[in-house]
């Protein structure tokens, strides 16, 4: 069952997945890992083996899905926070190759920022490879800036966007 959409484009919308969407999330996550295997801190083989309980647990963090009116997944992003002492971070950002250039990444990032703002968070963070000029330019247009913190992989740095408060 689909929940009300948060943001809409021409023929697509963004919605937050619930625990009952665990199979949908599994399919999208595996597609992400096949499409861009080096972009995420996991592997297809590892995540293919996750059970239902693990999938449902992962959906405790807001997972946003962009999908066509026909239900085709177009992109996804997660607003992850390991605990309340950490700032939220956009992770697992993905837009399907055939759907790029349609504003889907913008809508996913904005949905994450809106969720963080609704929770009265002061900042949203993310990590990006510095040599991924397309991603860096996108995040800069979305209001993020490098904040001087390095990621846990060579060439990966953190960007932050401060929210009005």
Image: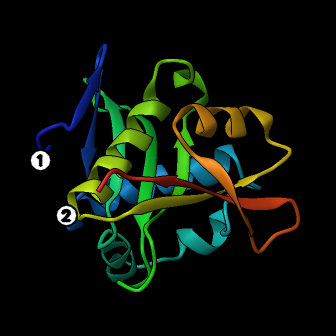
Quadrant of the rendered image containing residue 127:
bottom right
**Neighbour tally class for label 1: few under 14, some 14-19, many 20 plus, Cα within 10 Å:** few
Instruction: State the CA–CA distance, disc 2 to disc 1.
Output: 9 Å
* Percent coordinates x, y for residue 80 in the rendering: 43, 68
Question: Residue farthest to the front?
Answer: 165
CB under 8 Å between callouts 2 and 1?
yes
Q: How is the image coloured?
A: rainbow
Residue 41 falls left or right of residue 18? right
Query: Going by the image, does 103 lie left or right of 52?
Result: right
Of helix, strand and loop, which one carries label 2?
A: helix
Q: Position of residue 115 (x, y in %)?
A: 27, 54
**On screen, 18 above or below 134?**
below
Pick whichever, 121 or 91, lies toward us.
Answer: 121
Callout 1: SS: loop
In this view of the protein, which residue sits in the foreground, 22 or 6?
Answer: 6
Which residue is rendered at x = 48% and y = 77% of the image? 50
Coordinates of residue 23 in the picture (x, y in percent): 33, 59
Q: Is residue 38 visible?
A: yes
Label 2 crowd (10 A; few <14 / some 14-19 / many >=20): few
Q: Residue furthest top?
A: 10
In the picture, measured across the screen, residue 151 lies left or right of residue 83, that is right
Residue 1's tag is: 1
The front one of 48 and 61 is 61
Q: Position of residue 56 (x, y in %)?
A: 30, 74
Q: Which circle's residue, 2 or 1, is located before the other in the chain?
A: 1
Q: Nearer the viewer, residue 142 or 165?
A: 165
Query: Residue tagged by mark 2?
Result: 20
Residue drawn at (29%, 73%), measured in percent from left and top?
60
Question: What quarter of the picture does the C terminus occupy?
Answer: bottom left
């Amino acid at each position: 069952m689909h929940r009300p959409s948060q943001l809409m484009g021409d023929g697509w919308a963004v919605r937050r997945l619930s625990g009952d969407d665990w199979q949908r999330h599994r399919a999208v996550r595996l597609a992400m890992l096949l499409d861009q295997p080096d972009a995420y801190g996991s592997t297809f083989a590892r995540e293919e083996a996750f059970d239902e309980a693990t999938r449902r647990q992962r959906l405790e963090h807001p997972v946003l899905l962009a999908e066509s009116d026909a239900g085709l997944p177009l992109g996804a992003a997660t607003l992850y926070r390991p605990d309340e002492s950490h700032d939220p971070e956009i992770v697992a950002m993905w837009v399907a190759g055939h759907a790029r250039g349609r504003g889907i990444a913008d809508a996913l990032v904005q949905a994450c920022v809106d969720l963080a703002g609704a929770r009265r968070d002061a900042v949203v963070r993310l990590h990006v490879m510095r040599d991924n000029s397309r991603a860096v330019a996108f995040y800069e247009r979305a209001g993020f800036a490098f904040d001087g913190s390095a990621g846990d992989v060579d060439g990966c740095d953190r960007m932050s966007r401060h929210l009005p408060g």
